């Protein structure tokens, strides 16, 4: 009886300490998550270096992290700084009246009279829409300008978080196998289940990030280059917005290029509008419809509608991190229930083969 009391008390204490530790790390969730993601994505590179320098895991991890900085971190920082500069220019043009949402709506009203009739039938007033558009544009401009100032003021904090992420990623690369084995020993889920879940975690994280990032880069680059060739102002800003919008399955970058194409049509740039629509529907849309199921849906072993719902839900709950966290939670949910159903049916002497092949061990 005394031993049971001690065990239960210790387990309660262990639970409370674990919850406290998780709350302690909560402010660094994004930093830790992306450090783990870097370690997972670049694990094959680290393993190659490790095979070459078997006696120096520190050297292998450092070389892998250097490649990550050169290939990923520096280009992202350069793009973000350029977008911030264009955001400031956009806000200045809004304030000076060079960019006017009211003129945009007037042009749309003139070019598409049927749209005006439809809006009137639905109970929308054009003047109210113009005022709302102006207020929304000014609010967006203030948001961009405010965050630009905030980024400048918090540059030191950004550098610290970036350095912390790379620091954690170094140890995740160097000690990843040891940490996974330690967790497998500590968690009371059964070694087979734990290895499968950790392998699934790595597989889904790698597939989601690589797939979505590849699609985002391609769509943003093609869209930005097309807009630049058509002489649209702020092509880099619109291209980056297309890249971010592409993280939303089904809708994607069409949220950006369709309104621009309509605006070009409204101001009489019919040829430019047709070119943009052709590139958007024929090339950018094809990338989304063809590559996303191949790079994301197939590797995560999730149906397209689950990918869509989990991505939208993840973005709503976790912000930009949600495009990875959402599908990851969905995949773990389905995997855990699959294990449970399999175990229950096995216990009843009615074995059911798992729907998917058990993932391979973590790299």
Image: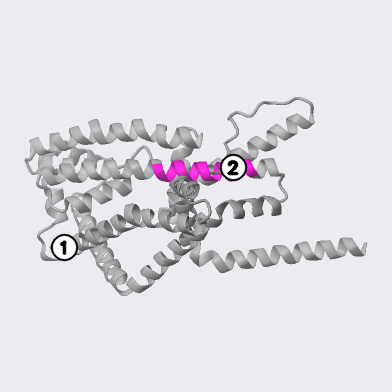
- What main secondary structure does the magenta stretch of the protein show? helix
What residue appears at the point 17 percent right and 40 percent down from the top-left corner?
261
Q: Secondary structure at mark 1?
A: helix
Taking the magenta stretch, the answer to whether it contains residue 361 is: no
Q: Secondary structure at mark 2?
A: helix
Between the C-alphas of marks 2 and 1, the distance is 45 Å
Q: Residue at x 83, y 62 (%)?
A: 7
Q: Is residue 208 magenta?
A: yes
Residue tagged 2: 333
The residue segment tinted magenta is: 195-210
Image x and y of residue 247, in percent: 36, 45
Residue at image location 53% in from the left, 44% down from the top: 363
Q: Give residue 304's position: percent from left, percent from top.
A: 45, 33
Q: Is residue 109 visible?
A: no
Mark 1 = which residue? 89
Residue density around tag 1, few if under 14, some if 14–19, many if 20 or more, within 10 Å: some
Front residue of this view, candidates 353 and 270: 353
Quadrant of the image for the N terminus? bottom right
């Amino acid at each position: 009886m005394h031993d049971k009391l001690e065990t239960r008390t210790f387990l309660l204490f262990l639970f409370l300490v674990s919850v406290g530790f998780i709350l302690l790390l909560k402010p660094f969730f994004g930093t830790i998550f992306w450090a783990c993601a870097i370690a997972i994505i670049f694990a094959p590179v680290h393993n190659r270096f490790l095979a070459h320098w078997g006696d120096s895991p520190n050297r292998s991890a450092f070389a892998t992290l250097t490649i990550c900085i050169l290939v990923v971190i520096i280009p992202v920082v350069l793009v973000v700084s350029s977008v911030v500069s264009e955001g400031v220019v956009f806000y200045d043009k809004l304030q000076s009246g060079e960019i006017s949402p009211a003129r945009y709506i007037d042009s749309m009203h003139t070019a598409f009279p049927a749209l005006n009739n439809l809006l009137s039938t639905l109970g929308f007033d054009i003047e109210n829409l113009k005022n709302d558009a102006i207020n929304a544009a000014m609010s967006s401009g203030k948001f961009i300008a405010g965050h630009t100032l905030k980024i400048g003021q918090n540059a030191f904090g950004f550098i610290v978080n970036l350095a912390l992420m790379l620091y954690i990623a170094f140890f995740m690369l160097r000690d990843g196998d040891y940490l996974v084995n330690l967790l497998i020993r500590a968690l009371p889920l059964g070694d087979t289940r734990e290895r499968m879940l950790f392998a699934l975690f790595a597989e889904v994280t790698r597939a989601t990030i690589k797939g979505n990032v590849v699609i985002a880069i391609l769509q943003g680059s093609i869209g930005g280059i097309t807009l630049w060739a058509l002489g649209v102002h702020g092509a880099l800003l619109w291209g980056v917005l297309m890249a971010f919008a592409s993280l939303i399955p089904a809708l994607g970058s069409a949220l950006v290029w369709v309104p621009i194409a309509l605006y070009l049509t409204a101001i009489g740039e019919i040829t430019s509008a047709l070119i943009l629509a052709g590139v958007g529907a024929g090339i950018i849309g094809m990338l989304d419809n063809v590559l996303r199921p191949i790079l994301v849906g197939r590797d995560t072993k999730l149906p397209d509608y689950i990918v869509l719902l989990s991505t939208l839900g993840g973005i709503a709950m976790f912000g930009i991190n949600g495009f990875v966290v959402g599908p990851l939670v969905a995949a773990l949910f389905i995997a855990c229930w699959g294990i449970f159903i399999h175990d229950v049916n096995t216990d009843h002497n009615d074995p059911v083969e798992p729907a998917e092949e058990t993932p391979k061990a973590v790299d």
